């Protein structure tokens, strides 16, 4: 398995990116192509204690970098020799099995859509992060790629999330729910009403395991394996989940350090606290897949450290080996809505 890695993308590039990639290669046996300014990448490799490139690791030179200030819609076109553009072209040409970048989300999505292309018949690619719930894990689809959606997009997000949960997370008959302001069928706006009807039709036909509307609190309590949302709503939910997790950990730390008795208690539950911290730490997941692109593309968090990069690469390996894309290609006819009111 060969993973193409954008060595120049992210706040901590190239050092953290290179360190995480080398770890994925050394510990997990993943072949790596590091794409970026060759001299800088080599210096980062040397800073990791490697005098020479390890076996299974290679560098592809790319002289430009897509900056966060660049227009994401055209950055990959304007900077044709950027690490992001070169990496996506390597993926497009079959020189690697997946692409990982911690760079600009908008530029990565635009580049993946126009260079690697969407799966034929998929209207919009979606971001599908795995979030922790009381039931284990759930896919939130979409979480920011598409702020404005049609009901057909939401139907396709349901299929994308369902196949991903089945193939990658190993969930049998994933429960699919529509994120809404109430569980009742009549709740929500016109988009939610129309999407509900399409999802119910697909559920009644046995194509997905649609369980109805779900509120955010019930979703976090494990009420669904796939949470379907437009990107605007989904992003707010995702950031809320991350923020609440950080807030609770901060408050627990303050409580445990407030006195002698609580410090003793903290020592007794240190292992449990560590497990809780890992549960809400985005670095443990590492990356978010762009579902609907014809080849695996994974977005790592912009602030990723080396551990997060390693985990993002492992997510890319899982994605590439899963057979998910073939599932979508073979069942795309189920995901189309032929209506005059739907936008292409």
Image: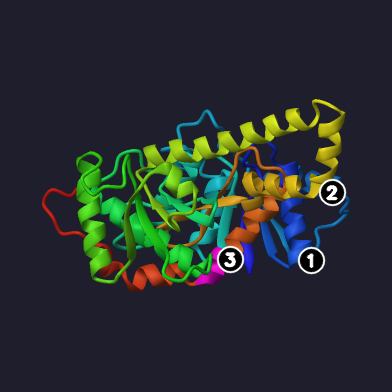
In terms of secondary structure, what is the magenta stretch mainly?
A: helix
Between the residue at mark 2 and the residue at mark 1, the CA separation in whole angstroms equals: 15 Å
Circle 3 or circle 2, nearest the eye: 3
Question: Label 3, on which residue?
Answer: 318
Circle 1 or circle 3, nearest the eye: 3
Question: Label 2, on which residue?
Answer: 48
**Left or right of 234, for residue 129:** right
Of label 3 and label 2, which has the lower sequence position? Answer: 2
For mark 3, give the secondary structure. helix
- How packed mark 2 is, by other alpha carbons closer than 10 Å (few <14, some 14-19, many 20 or more), is some
Residue 60 point in image, percent of width and height: 66, 54
Magenta-tinted stretch: 318-322
Q: Quadrant of residue 207?
A: bottom left
Q: Which mark is residue 259?
A: none
Q: Quadrant of the N terminus?
A: bottom right
Residue 191 point in image, percent of width and height: 23, 43
Q: Quadrant of residue 110?
A: top left
Q: Answer above or below: position of 165 versus 11.
A: below
Of label 2 and label 1, which has the lower sequence position? Answer: 2
Circle 2 or circle 1, nearest the eye: 2
Between the residue at mark 1 and the residue at mark 3, the CA separation in whole angstroms equals: 22 Å
Residue 105 point in image, percent of width and height: 50, 41
Question: Label 1, on which residue?
Answer: 55
Q: Answer above or below: position of 70 versus 222.
A: above
Between the residue at mark 3 and the residue at mark 2, the CA separation in whole angstroms equals: 26 Å
**Left or right of 154, for residue 283:** right
The reply to whether residue 91 is visible in this rendering is yes
For mark 2, give the secondary structure. loop
């Amino acid at each position: 398995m060969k993973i193409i890695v954008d060595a120049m993308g992210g706040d901590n590039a190239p050092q953290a990116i290179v360190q995480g990639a080398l770890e994925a290669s050394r510990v997990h046996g993943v072949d790596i192509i590091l794409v970026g300014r060759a001299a800088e990448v080599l210096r980062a490799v040397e800073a990791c204690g490697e005098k020479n490139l390890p076996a299974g690791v290679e560098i592809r030179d790319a002289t430009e970098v897509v900056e966060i200030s660049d227009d994401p819609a055209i950055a990959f076109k304007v900077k044709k020799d950027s690490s992001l553009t070169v990496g996506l072209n390597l993926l497009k040409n079959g020189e690697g099995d997946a692409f990982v970048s911690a760079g600009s989300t908008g530029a990565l999505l635009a580049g993946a859509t126009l260079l690697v292309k969407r799966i034929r018949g998929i209207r919009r690619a979606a971001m599908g992060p795995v979030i922790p719930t009381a039931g284990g894990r759930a896919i939130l689809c979409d979480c920011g790629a598409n702020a404005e959606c049609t009901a057909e997009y939401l139907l396709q997000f349901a299929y994308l999330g369902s196949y991903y949960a089945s193939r990658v997370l190993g969930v049998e008959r994933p429960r699919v729910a529509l994120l809404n302001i109430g569980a009742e069928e009549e709740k929500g706006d016109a988009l939610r009403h129309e999407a509900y009807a399409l999802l119910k039709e697909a559920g009644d036909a046995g194509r997905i395991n649609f369980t109805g509307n779900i509120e955010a609190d019930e979703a976090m309590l494990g009420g669904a394996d796939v949470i379907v949302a437009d990107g605007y709503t989904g992003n707010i939910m995702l950031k809320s989940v991350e923020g609440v997790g950080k807030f609770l950990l901060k408050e627990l730390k303050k409580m445990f350090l407030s006195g002698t008795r609580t410090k003793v208690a903290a020592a007794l539950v240190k292992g449990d606290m560590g497990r809780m911290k890992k549960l809400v730490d985005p670095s443990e997941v590492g990356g978010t897949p762009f579902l609907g692109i014809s080849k695996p593309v994974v977005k790592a968090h912009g602030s990723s450290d080396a551990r997060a990069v390693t985990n993002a690469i492992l997510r890319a390996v899982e994605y590439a080996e899963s057979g998910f894309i073939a599932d979508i290609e073979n069942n795309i006819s189920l995901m189309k809505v032929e209506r005059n009111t739907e936008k292409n």
